[in-house]
Amino acid sequence: MDPLKIEPGVCGCGVSDVDTDGDGFPDCIDQCPTDPSKHEPGVCGCGEPDTDVDGDGVLDCNDRCPTDPSKSEPGVCGCGVPDVDTDGDGTLDCNDDCPRDPNKVDPGVCGCGNAEVTPCQDPGSVDECPNNPNKTKPGICGCDTPDTDSDNDGTPGKSKFVCFVMCYVVFRLILRLALISHYTC
């Protein structure tokens, strides 16, 4: 006989039908009697929800990156940062200061995408005179002619007469092209 019960209830005589956590399961059959969201431990145990917040298929209690759907472990770069090597140089982008330059992981003096040569070219500049080691830009006289006043006439490179003739020829050519395009549809 159980002096506290008149019927056996769910738990039987001698065992209380109390539901401590109020989840609808008496403590005698509730494997998580103090967790109102569970009556069985599940994968994560009592007091820990069996949820997967980032939807990666790994429950948050086992997911070391619970808000990163691409990772369940931090890897080298940590949660939220992909462990990728964009340029294929063997150094992950998170540790590579030149992630798009397969020849460098550090910008050095000359910057990413530029070889370390002395002196460095301005990053982004292009050598417009690759066959002339003394010039990187054509200047007034072009790549093959030095920009010096060789005949002391005040004009670097070619004489004033040659420059005048060249300008006249170019002007006539432009005028001719303009006339042709004007009369043709």
Image (cartoon, rainbow, N blue to C red):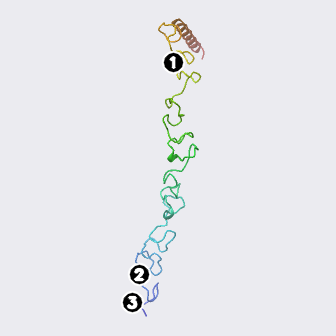
Residue depicted at 52% across the width and 9% down the height:
150
Q: Amino acid at mark 3?
A: Leu
In-front residue for pair 17/133: 133
Sort mark 2 into few (<14), some (14-19) or many (20+) by Cα contacts within 10 Å: some
- Spatial CA span between label 1 and label 3: 106 Å
Label 2 is placed on what type of residue?
Val
Q: Which mark is residue 71?
A: none
N-terminal-most mark, 2 or 1: 2
Q: Which quadrant is home to the N terminus? A: bottom left
Q: Quadrant of residue 128?
A: top right
- In the rendered structure, which amino acid carries the disc numbered 1? Gly
The answer to which of 74 and 150 lies nearer the viewer is 150
Residue 88, percent from left and from top: 58, 44
Other-residue count near label 1 (Cα within 10 Å), few / some / many at <14 / 14–19 / ≥20: some
Q: Which residue is mark 3?
A: 4
Q: Nearer the viewer, mark 1 or mark 3?
A: 1
Asked if marks 1 and 3 touch (Cβ < 8 Å), the reply is no
Is 63 placed above or below 111 here? Answer: below
Secondary structure at numbered mark 1: loop
- Disc 2 and disc 1: Cα gap in Å? 95 Å
Which of pointers 2 and 1 indicates the residue nearer the eye? Answer: 1
Pointer 1 residue: 139
First-in-chain label (2 vs 3):
3
Pointer 2 with pointer 3, Cβ within 8 A? no
CA gap, disc 2 to disc 3? 12 Å
Label 3 element class: loop
Q: Position of residue 115 (x, y in %)?
A: 54, 34
Q: Which numbered tag is attached to residue 18?
A: 2
In terms of sequence position, does the residue under pointer 1 or pointer 3 come before the other?
A: 3
Q: Residue furthest bottom?
A: 1
- The C terminus is located in which quarter? top right
Q: Is residue 134 above or below residue 40?
A: above
